[in-house]
Amino acid sequence: MAGEERTIGSERIYDGKIVSLRCDTVELNNQRYAKREIVEHEGGVAVLALDPQGKIFFVKQFRVAVGKEMLELPAGLVEHDEMPMDAAARELEEETGQRPGKVNFLLECYTSPGFSTEKIHLFLAEDLTSTEQNLDDDEEVEVYRYSLEEALKLIQLGEIVDAKTIVGILTLAQEGRRHDK
């Protein structure tokens, strides 16, 4: 059975705008010690936004970390003193030009708990009103819409490889199966 690790020391390595890095020394159950590199991240939101025909809004943008364009759900950071639901509505409108009339919490998940504290809050947005895209100065995104069936196929084809997007699509598919019963 896995045991709890007790942190006995922590060294701050880097403090950045979006992430910080620390190296923790932990004591294991067998009185051995190990190092754990931890990326600290305040977390973010992702939005499954559905148009009146049930199509899902996606954004495509180049991600330097992986060196390619990624098709993703609209997403972003939660700003200081902002509620995740408000951040979801804001990010959706900024990235896609769609203002939600209704936003519902679906789930939260850790993106990579082996080394990161990042948690994503996933929301469902409906009753959309078209407004204007309001991208940050350093953002370049293209907006796409796909049906759930098309999105599932894009996962199978390896065209959607972003974890939060896959979780969102599979959650929507599971919700649909529950309602069909």
Image (cartoon, rainbow, N blue to C red):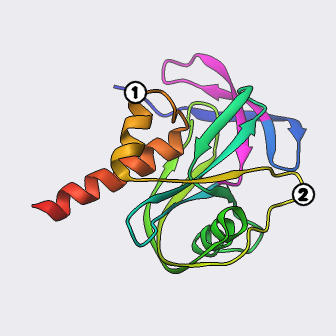
Dot 2 amino acid type: Asp
Q: Quadrant of the N terminus?
A: top left
User: Looking at the picture, how far across and down is residue 98, in whole percent?
Assistant: 61, 72
Q: 167 or 33, which is in the foreground? A: 167
Magenta segment main secondary structure:
strand
Boundaries of the magenta span: 22-43
Left or right: 135, with 57 as reference point: right
Question: Which quarter of the picture shows residue 64?
Answer: top right
Q: Quadrant of the C terminus?
A: bottom left
> In the rendered structure, which disc, 2 or 1, sits on the residue that comes first in sequence?
1
Against 113, residue 49 (above or below) is below
Q: Which residue is mark 1?
A: 2
Q: Residue at x 67, y 70 (%)?
A: 97
Of tags 2 and 1, the one toward the viewer is 2
Q: Residues within 10 Å of mark 1 (few under 14, many from 20)?
A: few
Would you say residue 30 sits in the magenta stretch? yes
Q: 52 or 161, which is in the foreground? A: 52
